[in-house]
Each structure stands twice: as C-alpha cells, then as structure tokens.
Amino acid sequence: MSAPTRGLYEVLITEALETQLGRLEDSLVAVRGQLRAAEAADRIALHLARVVERAIAAIDEDERPGFGIALAPRKRMLAPAGM
C-alpha cells in the first residue's frame, strides 16, 4: 500500500488559499476537485465556523460576550425562508 499523498483535504479554496496555491514550488501540484452537493453543507459550515472563531478571537476578551450576543441573532440571515 502506498503512502497517502500529502496535502489539504476537504478544505474550501478561498481567494487567500488560491493565492497560496499559486505560489507552490514547481515540484508540487495543486489538485482540485468540485465540492460535492452531499458535502456542501458540512464543508461550508466548517469553513464559516473557522472564520467566526478567528474573528471572535481577534476581539478583546472583555468584548467577546457582547459581540457574540450581537452576532447570534444574525444567524437568521443564513437560514432559508421558513426555517
């Protein structure tokens, strides 16, 4: 059995990641695949969770609870109508 190929798996390719992939050494090749519909909710949710976590971590600790309280009601923007 051969060793698995090194790399990132199941990561959404954001503009920032695309820029980094463009800077790979010539000996490395980025192989991209389409996001499968069955995995879209999970992959996008994980990506957004990481973004929100970094944003909250960047805020002063004393301000984090208030930020979270203000952010929580906005989750409705992401819900389909009728949910």
Image: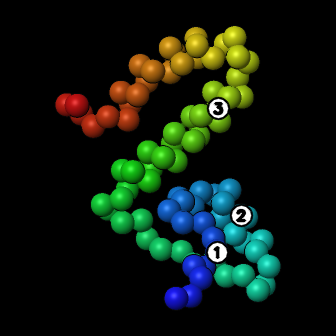
Q: Position of residue 47 (x, y in %)?
A: 52, 48
Helix, strand or loop at label 3? It is helix
Report how far apart the C-alphas of labels 1 and 2 lie in the structure.
19 Å
Residue at the image point whose x is 63% and y is 71% from the top? 7
Horizontally, residue 12 falls left or right of residue 44, namely right
Relative to 37, residue 55 above or below = above
Q: Label 2: few (<14), some or many (≥20) within 10 Å?
A: few
Q: Amino acid at mark 3?
A: Ala
Amino acid under label 1? Arg
Q: Which x, y percent locates residue 43?
A: 44, 53
Residue highlighted by disc 1: 6
Labelled pair 1, 2 in contact (Cβ < 8 Å): no
The residue located at (32%, 34%) in the rendering is 79
The type of colouring in the image is: rainbow
The residue tagged with tag 1: helix, strand or loop? loop
Q: Nearer the viewer, residue 3 or 82?
A: 3
Q: Quadrant of residue 3?
A: bottom right
State the residue at coordinates (59%, 40%). Answer: 51
Q: Which residue is mark 3?
A: 55
Numbered badge on residue 59: none
Disc 2/disc 3 C-alpha distance (Å): 21 Å
Residue at the image point whose x is 50% and y is 14% from the top? 69
Which tag is nearer the camera, tag 1 or tag 2? 1
Q: Which mark is residue 19?
A: 2
